[in-house]
Image (cartoon, rainbow, N blue to C red):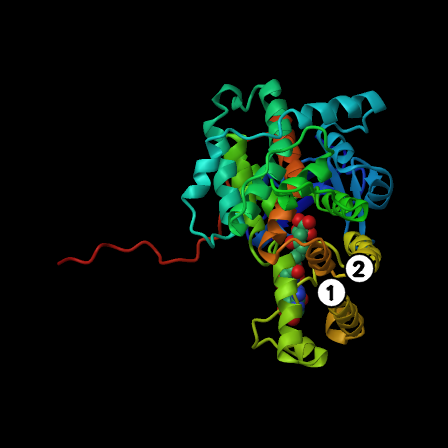
């Protein structure tokens, strides 16, 4: 119930209904539309749910107009400046920053779950040599459900907790296995004496034949990238995890559904699409002006990858952070400086263009991220795997929050039916 209400009336039928308005800590309040059909006989209509609050959540807040991103009230700028990825994982899962002892204990828990069952290795034998890593990741994450029947009771808080820890811990191991399979190199086992990011880089780029020591600059850049991709409110893949999980599906299957949704080029696949776009400009010699013109042409399905956002109508704060890392990393490690300069020129010319200004289209998280990952030696077909690895904590935090929500029920949208009217089967 709420003191604040809005009235909806239908002059055609004379029906009227008062709807509660729920207040928010930040951002827009929400109108409770659950009684509109009973009161007016009408559904609400919102393709893509762009203006529909699907749940109450305490995890992340985005102000698209201001370009603001908060996790449990802390700004993304403060978190990238002061936190580690595992500290942000703890925050997203538990709602508060950990004490020093709490963080040490959490790091120890995650470290003890980094290995996967040895039989997971045989799943990779079934893939073609050139299988896309996202196909391998979504498959092997779903397969984890077959190893943990002892802890997939979604109504058991302890099962939800151990599953969250297992997923955060095992995603880097599975991601690195996808990469190693693709490279034809032996899988590297996790090393429990290494930090989370160092361990991942060791499993990715280490080989049995020699010692591998990652550069501190690369570790810091990747740590920041993981923080920037950790969660983002009710985006397409997180909403997929919630909807899949709302039927009671086990968490591994629900996260695998989220990986599938993230793979799309309009969502997490955009980081790979941005690099393909920039490479194509370089290889074709097409001018930036011509590329921008194609993106504006309604008859051309081409869109400027890495630009625009359903929520941000200002700079994506993550894109600003990533651009700074790009600059520092390329100066330190070298890498594709010309491509970075091309991206910055493309950004400057696009932002000066009326079409993009009118539609409030700015660079998003995916615009510069590929340049960093290429500088780190991560191949393009692994870019979305990196996004999935980072976003797993957000997905499982929302999945857990959904199961703790007293208003939780199975998701079941309705529709506006515009198909054929009822008709008899034609007599033979
Ligand atoms: C992510 O939701 C999240 O939070 C996602 C994410 C996360 O962390 O989870 O932030 C990660 O997915 C970032 C977005 C990555 N995707 C891309 O970079 C792909 C390119 N961007 C577009 O596909 C698009 O901007 C979307 C999908 C991101 C947003 O689409 P919307 O909100 O549905 O925008 P729209 O289709 O309503 O576009 C509004 C107008 C249209 O023109 P008009 O019909 O009004 O004339 O803007 C145009 C669009 O044609 N437009 C673009 C454009 N994006 C929108 N025109 C050219 N290039 C673009 N990139």
Taking the image as drawn, is residue 14 in sight?
yes
Q: Is residue 65 above or below residue 226?
A: below
Q: Quadrant of residue 230?
A: top right
Disc assigned to residue 354: none
Q: Residue at x 32, y 54 (%)?
A: 422
Direction front: furthest residue? 209
Residue 141 on image: x %, y %? 52, 37
The location of residue 215, given as percent across then percent down, is 78, 46
Q: Quadrant of ligand 1?
A: bottom right
Task: Please name the residue shown 44% across and 37% down the image.
Answer: 122
The vertical placement of 157 against 336, above or below, is above
The total number of labels drawn is 2
Q: Quadrant of residue 1?
A: top right
The reply to whether callout 2 and callout 1 are in contact (CB within 8 Å) is: yes
| Mark 2 and mark 1: Cα distance apart in space | 7 Å
Q: Nearer the viewer, residue 358 or 210?
A: 210
Residue at position x 50%, y 24% from top? 148
Residue 336: mark:
1
For label 2, the crowd category at 10 Å Cα-Cα, with few meaning under 14, some 14 to 19 and many 20 or more, is some
Q: Is residue 246 left or right of residue 417?
A: right
Relative image position of residue 104 (x, y in whole percent): 78, 24
The quarter of the image holding the C terminus is bottom left
- In this view of the protein, which residue sits in the foreground, 21 or 119? 119
Q: Quadrant of residue 276?
A: bottom right
Q: Is residue 70 left or right of residue 183?
A: right
Along the viewing direction, whichever of 405 and 296 lies nearer the viewer: 296
In depth, the one of 192 and 312 nearer the eye is: 192
Quickly name the residue at label 2. 330
């Amino acid at each position: 119930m709420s003191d604040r209400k809005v009235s909806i009336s239908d002059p055609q039928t004379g029906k009227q209904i008062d709807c509660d308005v729920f207040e928010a800590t930040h951002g827009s309040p929400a109108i409770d539309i659950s009684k509109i059909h009973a009161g007016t006989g009408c559904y609400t209509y919102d393709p893509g749910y762009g203006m529909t609050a699907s749940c109450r959540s305490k995890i992340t807040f985005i102000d698209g107009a201001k370009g603001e991103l908060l996790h449990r009230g802390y700004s993304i700028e403060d978190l990238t400046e002061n936190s580690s990825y595992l500290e942000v994982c703890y925050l997203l899962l538990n709602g508060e920053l950990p004490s020093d002892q709490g963080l040490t204990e959490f790091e120890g828990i995650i470290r003890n779950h980094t290995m996967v069952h040895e039989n997971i290795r045989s799943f990779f034998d079934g893939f073609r040599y050139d299988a896309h890593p996202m196909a391998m990741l979504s498959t092997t994450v779903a397969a984890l459900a077959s190893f943990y029947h002892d802890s997939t009771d979604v109504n058991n808080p302890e099962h939800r907790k151990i599953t969250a820890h297992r997923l955060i811990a095992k995603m880097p191991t599975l991601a690195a296995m996808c990469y190693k399979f693709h490279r034809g190199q032996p899988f590297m086992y996790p090393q429990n004496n290494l930090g989370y990011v160092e361990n991942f880089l060791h499993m990715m780029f280490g080989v049995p034949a020699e010692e591998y020591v990652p550069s501190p600059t690369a570790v810091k850049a990747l740590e920041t990238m993981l923080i920037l991709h950790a969660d983002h409110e009710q985006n397409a893949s997180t909403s997929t995890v919630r909807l899949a999980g709302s039927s009671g599906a086990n968490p591994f299957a629900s996260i695998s559904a989220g990986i599938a949704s993230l793979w799309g080029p309009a969502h997490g696949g955009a980081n790979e699409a941005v690099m393909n776009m920039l490479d194509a400009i370089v290889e074709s010699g097409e001018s930036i002006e011509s590329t921008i013109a194609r993106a504006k042409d309604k008859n051309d399905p081409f869109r400027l990858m890495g630009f625009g956002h359903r929520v941000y109508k200002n700079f994506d704060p993550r894109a600003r952070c990533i651009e700074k890392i790009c600059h520092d990393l390329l100066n330190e490690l070298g890498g594709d400086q010309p491509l970075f300069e091309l991206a910055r020129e493309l950004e400057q010319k696009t932002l000066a263009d009326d079409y993009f200004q009118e539609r409030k289209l700015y660079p998003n998280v995916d615009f510069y991220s590929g340049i960093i990952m290429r500088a780190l030696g991560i191949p393009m077909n692994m870019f979305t795997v990196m996004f999935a690895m980072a976003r797993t904590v957000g997905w499982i935090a929302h999945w857990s929050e959904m199961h703790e929500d007293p208003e939780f029920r199975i998701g079941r949208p309705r529709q506006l039916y515009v198909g054929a009217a009822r008709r008899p089967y034609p007599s033979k």
